[in-house]
Structures are given as C-alpha cells and as structure tokens.
C-alpha cells in the first residue's frame, strides 16, 4: 500500500460518482475535498448508511452495507484502478485507505471489521485506533516470531531477550505499516490466550510457604502468554487444544516481546510509540475468556 496525492476518481460503470482532491495523508488514510459527480446522488445514501454504522461500531451491519458500495463503485488512483478501498464521504470531505491487494480481517481473511471500520473525519484519539491500521498477515507475523528462537531455542530468559533484540532489528527494517501491523497481531495473539483455563494454572515449580500451588499474578500471566507466542505458531496453536501444554510456560516469561514493535517504531520514526491496539492484551481483559468476570 502506498500513499498518493492528486485527484482520485470514483466511477459507477462509466459514470462519474465524484473526485477526491487529496490534501492530507495520515497514514494509512488519505483525506481530501470531495467534488460530487453526476452519479453521486444515486449512491449517496449508501455512503451515509455506512458512515453511520461505522460511527455506531456496528461492524457486522457495516460490512453488509459497505459491500453494496464496493459492488457499485470503483476507485481510480492517479496511477490507475485500485484493488480495494475503504471510503467515507461526509458533505464535501472524504477520507479513505486503499490497497493493491484485498484487505485482511483479524482472522487473516479478506473483508471484516479490521479492514472496514475507520474513524470519522476529525475524530479524536479516543476512537479505537486499531480499526484504521494496516494489517500484517498472520503468516508474516509468525515468520517474524521465528526470529526469537522458537520453542526449542528460548529455554532461558537470556535467550528470550537476545531473540527479541534480533527481532527488533529485523522489524525496524520493515515498512512502518508493518511495524504497526506487528503490534496489532501481537496484541490479538495475547488477547486470545487471555483465558481462565490458562490464567488459573499455578506457576510450574513454585509453591507457597504452606506447600500450596503458587498462583500467577496478572503481570506474570501476561509475560507467560508472551512466552507462548514467542515459542512459535505450532506451540501457540497447540495450547488451545491441550491447556496443559501452557503449564511449562508459566516458568518461562517473555516480557521483552511486548516492546519489540514499540522499539522498532522508535528506531524508524524517532518518536515513542503512543498508539492503542485494537485488542487489549492485559490480563482478564478478554471477557469471552473469563466468563465469570462478565457483568
């Protein structure tokens, strides 16, 4: 995905829906002045509905509504047609993101809310920023995680720290969007592991003074989940089928993995990471994983 200024055109069949004169880039979004064409009145209700659903965060309904737009309207960049785009129009303003390839959702498939939902014009920082970010594929995420060392190569905390340092260096060579995308995928992977069946396991090899099992604290559980992710895709996926496979990692924490993308971001931009991810990975934040905490 790249960023291009100039004039972008929207067409319906051979009719001009409108033009967007790009005035500002806020990666990965482009913002500009919208000039309606003769075909715009016919599709204006579609854009109004999709914007309202986006602001209401009704992503399931949004996907259905936005599909009507993409099946009706095509976008042309200054360089030619684009494969996929997410566009909002409000009065004389338009903001959009685009890609030469299909957007991917949180499960690595095309479409879905990760590729659809975005902030409204002039939105504040309290809008969930994870919804307007570029996406890293799960395949690429796990390829990068392999740099840490994998299940057999990270038996000590020192090895974990060294592996995470290597990963930071490699990630810093990726496009900025992929650094952000890595942070999003990491947060999602940790969020999925945030389940009662894992968090209530005692720390392997540790006991309280009275000999009873030593429970995990919130921080300990977070760093343990990071160690599971650092062990690689096969290990990560296996624990969902057999929670006992999670148990050994309670004695192997990987806090440095949490900061890899933040450090890479700072190396590339010279500024500190100040973004919120779409998924909250703090312990007990996954309501589906802790049903007893719902209410």
Image: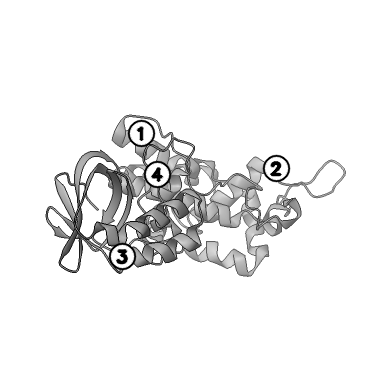
Rounded to the nearest angstrom, the CA distance separating label 1 from label 4 is 27 Å
Instruction: Specify the label residue 70 is tagged with.
Output: 3
Question: Sequence order check: which comes first, mark 4 or mark 2?
Answer: 4
Q: Is residue 66 something that shows in the picture?
A: yes
Decide if residue 26 is on the left or right side of residue 213.
Answer: left
Decide if residue 196 is on the left or right side of residue 46.
Answer: right
Closer to the observer: label 1 or label 4? 4
Q: Which residue is mark 1?
A: 266
Q: Which residue is mark 2?
A: 217
Decide if residue 266 is on the left or right side of residue 196.
Answer: left
Residue name at image x 49 percent, y 37 percent: 126
Q: Which residue is mark 4?
A: 120
* Label 4: how many Cα within 10 Å (few below 14, some 14–19, many 20+): some
Residue 275 point in image, percent of width and height? 44, 38
* Label 2: how many Cα within 10 Å (few below 14, some 14–19, many 20+): some
Count of picture labels:
4
């Amino acid at each position: 995905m790249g960023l291009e200024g100039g004039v972008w055109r929207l067409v319906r069949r051979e009719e001009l829906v409108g033009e967007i004169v790009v005035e500002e880039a806020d990666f990965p979004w482009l913002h500009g002045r919208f000039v309606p064409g003769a075909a715009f009145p016919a599709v204006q209700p579609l854009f109004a509905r999709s914007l309202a659903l986006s602001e209401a965060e009704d992503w399931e309904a949004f996907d259905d509504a936005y599909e009507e737009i993409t099946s009706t309207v095509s976008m042309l960049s200054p360089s030619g047609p684009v494969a996929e785009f997410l566009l909002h129009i409000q009065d004389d303003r338009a903001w959009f993101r685009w890609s030469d390839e299909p957007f991917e959702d949180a499960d690595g498939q095309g479409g879905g809310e990760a590729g659809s939902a975005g902030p409204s014009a002039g939105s504040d920082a309290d809008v969930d920023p994870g919804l307007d970010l570029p996406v890293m594929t799960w395949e690429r995420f796990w390829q990068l995680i392999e740099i840490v060392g994998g299940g057999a190569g990270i038996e000590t905390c020192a090895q974990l720290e060294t592996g995470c340092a290597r990963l930071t260096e490699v990630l810093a060579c990726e496009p900025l969007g992929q650094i952000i995308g890595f942070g999003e995928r990491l947060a999602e992977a940790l969020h999925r592991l945030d389940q009662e069946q894992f968090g209530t396991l005692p720390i392997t090899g540790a006991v309280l003074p009275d000999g009873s099992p030593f429970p995990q604290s919130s921080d300990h559980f977070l760093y343990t989940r990071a160690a599971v992710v650092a062990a690689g895709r096969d290990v990560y996926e296996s624990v969902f089928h057999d929670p006992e496979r999670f148990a050994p990692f309670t004695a192997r924490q990987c806090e440095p993995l949490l900061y890899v993308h933040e450090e890479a971001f700072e190396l590339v931009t010279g500024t500190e990471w100040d973004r919120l991810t779409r998924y909250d990975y703090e312990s007990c934040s996954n309501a589906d994983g802790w049903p007893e905490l719902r209410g």
